Every structure is written in C-alpha cells, then in structure tokens.
Image: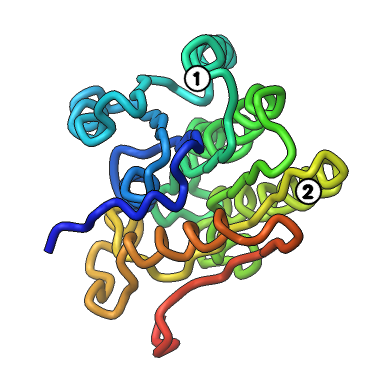
Amino acid sequence: MKKTANNSLKGKTALVTGATRGIGLAIANALVDAGAQVIITGRDAAKLRAAGKRLSTRGAAFSVDIRDAQEVKTLFRDVKKRFGHLDFLINNAGIAHANLTVEKMPFDVWRSVVATNLDGLFLVTHHALPLMDRGGVIVNNLSRAAVQPFLGMSAYNSTKAGALMFTNSLRMEVRKQGIRVTALMPGAIETDIWEQFWADAPRDKMLSPAEVASAVLHVLTMPAGATIEQLQIGPASGDL
C-alpha cells in the first residue's frame, strides 16, 4: 500500500548523506513522505538518479564523495544558495570492510574506512553547522559496533567508537545553540553491508531499514525541550 504524506515536517529541510540505498534511502523516503525538502548525497551516479526521482521539486540530489574536503565545501555552497538553511542533518554515509585481522588488514583498507567514517563525518558536520539554527537536529548513524566490538572488524569498530565520541563532543558544543544531536546505533538491519563480512547472515531475523527510518522520524519530531541522545535499535527477539 502506498504511503501518503503526513506533512509533519512540512517547511523543514533535511540533508541525508549516503542516501542511495539501505538506511539512508529509507530515511530520505520517510522525510519526503513527512513533507520535508530532502537533499541527498551519494557516490553511485545511477543509484543517486534513481533515489532522486522521488524528491521532485522539493529536494535535490548531489554526487559527493564526503572524503573530499573540496567536494563537501562545494556541496554546502550549493545547498546554501538553493535552500538557505538546514533543519536536519542525517550523517548516514559509512562503509565497512571484509572480515580481516589487524595483522592481515592492508593499510589502504584501514585508511579508506577512517576517511569515510570519521573524516567524512567531520567534514559534512563542519560545513552543515553554519546553516543550522535553534531547533535543528543532527542524527549520526553509527552502529552497535560503537559500543560492542566485532571480531575481524577493527577498522569499522574503531571508527564507529570514534564517531560516538565525536557525536558526544558535538552535542556538548551545540547544546546552547539549541541544536540537538542523536547517536543512532542500529543493530541487525537488513542492508547490503552484510555482503562485505557475513554474506549468509540470517536476514529474515533483522529489522528493515524502514523500521529504523520510523525511529529516526520520531527523533526529529520530538518536542523542542526533549532529546534522545542515543538510539539503539534492533530486533526485539535479541537473536542478533
């Protein structure tokens, strides 16, 4: 059954990084359904075009590598020119890696994960903040790995733990500005990321990206005087 817009976020502008698939795409779709103007970013041009078709005249899709400081700077120059401000920032872009011990992990794999999951997170947030005012919300999509390490995933674990500390530090900095910051820590969610390190994972036991998006929408619509600092979400069964 096709969802209808509820307009709970009408007049709001949101930016979602890494929104061409999985949780990012689900959040972008939920924001559109709620009436927001939605800006999405991604690196896969074909998937970005497909995802951008839903945005119509209420949003925009930008091909951006968040690891590239100049590309991120250009993105926010264009966002400011076209939209003027941001109400919501969803830092969703991130990558994992194959299951590798520290001894066997190539340095270029380590650097790629750090560049995306930490440098990219910083760059996007750094340039987004001047466009945000009181009432704004930042949601950083981390992972349960931020607090629970997984075997063979040292780069991923380290960057997600670092991203949690970045999120906590950011929250302290912007609290007086009236900007709220939430650490989203999903557990087992049915996305393509499992192909990288657990191809035969039991996806039938996982939550869908749409269920995560629903929880994020709740965070964004909280009363101004309330906040959710950490949102851990996963299957109620506790099997994964």
User: Callout 2 environment at 10 Å: few (<14), some (14 to 19), or many (20+)?
Assistant: some
Q: Quadrant of the N terminus?
A: bottom left
Q: Is residue 127 above or below residue 236?
A: above
Q: Counting other residues with Cα less than 10 Å from the Cα at mark 1, is it few (<14), some (14-19), or many (20 or more)?
A: some
**Are dots 2 and 1 in contact, CB under 8 Å?**
no
Classify 209 as above or below 40.
Answer: below
Q: Quick one: SS at disc 1?
A: helix
The three-letter code of the residue at mark 2 reads Arg
For this view, does 134 lie left or right of residue 7?
Answer: right
Residue that mark 2 sits on: 171
| Quadrant of image for the C terminus | bottom left
Q: Secondary structure at mark 2?
A: helix
Q: Earlier in the sequence, mark 2 or mark 1?
A: 1
Q: Front-most of 155 and 240?
A: 240
Q: Residue at x 47, y 65 (%)?
A: 215
Q: Residue at x 54, y 34 (%)?
A: 107
Q: Quadrant of residue 178?
A: top right
Dot label at residue 183: none
Q: Nearer the viewer, residue 205 or 103?
A: 205
In x, y percent, where is residue 69? 59, 15
Q: Nearer the viewer, mark 2 or mark 1?
A: 1
Q: Quadrant of residue 188?
A: bottom left
Please state if 1 lies on the left or on the right of 37 as rendered: left
Q: Position of residue 146 (x, y in %)?
A: 62, 60
Residue tagged by mark 1?
83
Cα–Cα span, label 2 and label 1 = 24 Å
Observer-nearest of 3 and 64: 3
Q: Please state the horizontal and vertical placement of residue 208, each as a whole percent of the image.
A: 30, 66
Of the residues shown, which amino acid type is indicated by label 1?
Phe
Q: Determine the residue located farthest toward the left in the rendered image.
A: 1
Residue at left offset 34%, top offset 28%: 58
Question: In the current view of this chain or complex, which residue is farthest to the bottom?
Answer: 237
